[in-house]
Image (cartoon, rainbow, N blue to C red):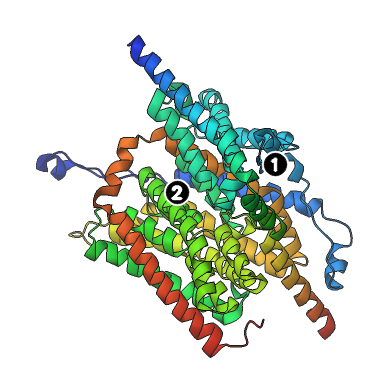
Amino acid sequence: MSASPDPASPENDDDAAIALPPERPSLWVDMRTNEDWWAIWCGALLLALAFAAVWFGRPAGLAESVELGDPLQVVSPLKSYLAKPGSWDSNPLASLDGKLIGIGGTFLVLAALFAGAMRIRGKSVSRFLLGFPLIFLLAALAYVMAGHTVLKAYNLEYALWALLVGLIISNIVGTPSFMKPAIMTEFFIKTGLVLLGAEVLMSRLLALGLPGVFVAWVVTPVVLVSTYIFGQKILKIPSRSLNMVVSADMSVCGVSAAIATAAACKAKKEELSLAIGMSLSFTVIMMVVLPAIIKATGIDPILGGAWLGGTIDSTGAVAAAGAVLGDEALEVAATVKMIQNILIGVTAFCVAIYWVTYVERDPNGPSLGVSEIWYRFPKFVLGFVAMSILFSILYSTMTAGPELVDAMIKGSTKTLRGWLFCLAFVCIGLETNFKQLLPQLKGGKPLILYVCGQSLNLILTLTMAYLMFKIVFPTSVTP
Amino acid sequence: MRALKTQKWLTLTLVVTVLAVIWLVLLPAYARQPEMSEHLQWLDRQGIDPSAMYYTELEVMERILQRQRTESLLDKAKHE
């Protein structure tokens, strides 16, 4: 999904003899023009402003209250100015109750941010501003559609409806040309991922001690790598990126992992759509079937919770399934999933490295040098990882770090990140033809890949959870 | 050409109508079914949004983390 430059491809041998590789921009020029770098600048600016707002708006006596063990509540001053449509059950207008100022504020922030970026990058601001309001309105519509309580209960996330809204327009009447300058799928996704980096807090890794780490951080990479190899060697899936995105969304944590991995391995938009569609469909089944199996077989809630947390793709669905088994299962399931969520950063980084050093390399050519790897590396991943490290440090080392970082995420960046992903999925729909989606399903290979990978995931996670929570550390989580 | 354009807009109108019926009639009716309504209220009480994409979007996770934080702060205060 990235727009990384490709090496020149000479048309014939004579040309090849005299063709010189295109001159590469200096780092400074790259930083001023490349979309990846701009995603980092935009994400970092939003995070800096969001954190500054929380810092300057923090209540007096916060540090003292933390020392006394009863921290004061911190609320971001930006909270009421940034919002998304809420949930509703009979009247869709209820989803906008008290949210219009926040939705308008979000529109203004994003329009100003991207218009500024377009201006500095030498692109037409007026053409962007002409198309952006309609794309934002479509994203708002997708949010309202996703806000119906029944759809939420079945884990049918906004990504699906944003995609649907875009697909309907592009495939029936065609995407109007005035919208096209504002269709910036990759820019929205990469900026959203830099914001997501601030939510990947490493200190939460040990929330369940070693058993949680083993279930979420040992089984998950094993399943990811095994599924990818299975797809390549046994199923012979032609698209490596589709193979990787399906493996990541199935083994890590559904839609968010699919977005990050797709961006890291430059997957096609249709591949991301397909992976997300499959993940959401299987999640609906698993969130109903797995708790029933656990109840029927008498697996205890802690083990059952760990199993749910390590296998069901979507974070919300894990909590819903865990709650069916009781409070202990809910807590273990949600915490295992949270630990797995944190794996997104590492996954995106490793996939990006693997892609530039192995997949994109000419198999007959020499191995790549460091400068070539750096040139090809999707730079926004660095922003994603850097924000994760920075906010993990702030969270762990500052007095009241958890209160401040949580207030920033809850009051502003989480909302902005959601809007950016929603805008990106509307854009994917607006750029996708139904006919482009069908070949991806050829021979049902992605489906077989998902089913086989998920089966392995179910077996390995249950085995590891049993070993960790029942044999090696039986008292780590007590009922 | 004009006929094609008209056909496209008619198709769009039809699709939008179908979606409107699903979202404005069928889904609300389903949400009112006693069993579904009870399930939705239970999710709400638990602070669970099954469509949450990331742990920071889960109210229940917030409560769990807040409890863990309070426990660790109290432990720390006791030791000091």
As drawn, which residue projects farthest toward the front? B34
Residue at image position (71%, 69%) is A397
Residue at image position (63%, 68%) is A330
Work out whether disc 2 and disc 1 sit on a shared chain.
Answer: yes
Circle 2 sits in a helix, a strand or a loop, which is it? Answer: helix
Q: Which residue matches tag 1?
A: A82
Q: Is residue A286 left or right of residue A60?
A: left
A73 and A5: which is toward the camera: A73
* CA neighbours of label 1 inside 10 A, class few (<14), some (14 to 19), many (20+): many
Chain under label 2? A
Q: Which residue matches tag 2?
A: A27
- The amino acid on which the numbered mark 1 sits, given as a three-letter code, is Leu
Q: Image quarter for residue A233? A: bottom left
* CA neighbours of label 2 inside 10 A, class few (<14), some (14 to 19), many (20+): few
- The amino acid on which the numbered mark 2 sits, given as a three-letter code, is Leu
As drawn, which residue projects farthest toward the top? B2
Circle 1 sits in a helix, a strand or a loop, which is it? Answer: loop
Q: Is residue A189 above or below residue A402?
A: above
Which numbered circle lies on residue A373?
A: none
Residue at image position (62%, 84%) is A476
State which mark lies toward you, 2 or 1: 1
Spatial CA span between label 2 and label 1 = 35 Å
Percent coordinates x, y for residue B39 in the rendering: 64, 55
Chain under label 1? A
* Mark 2 vs 1, N-terminal side: 2
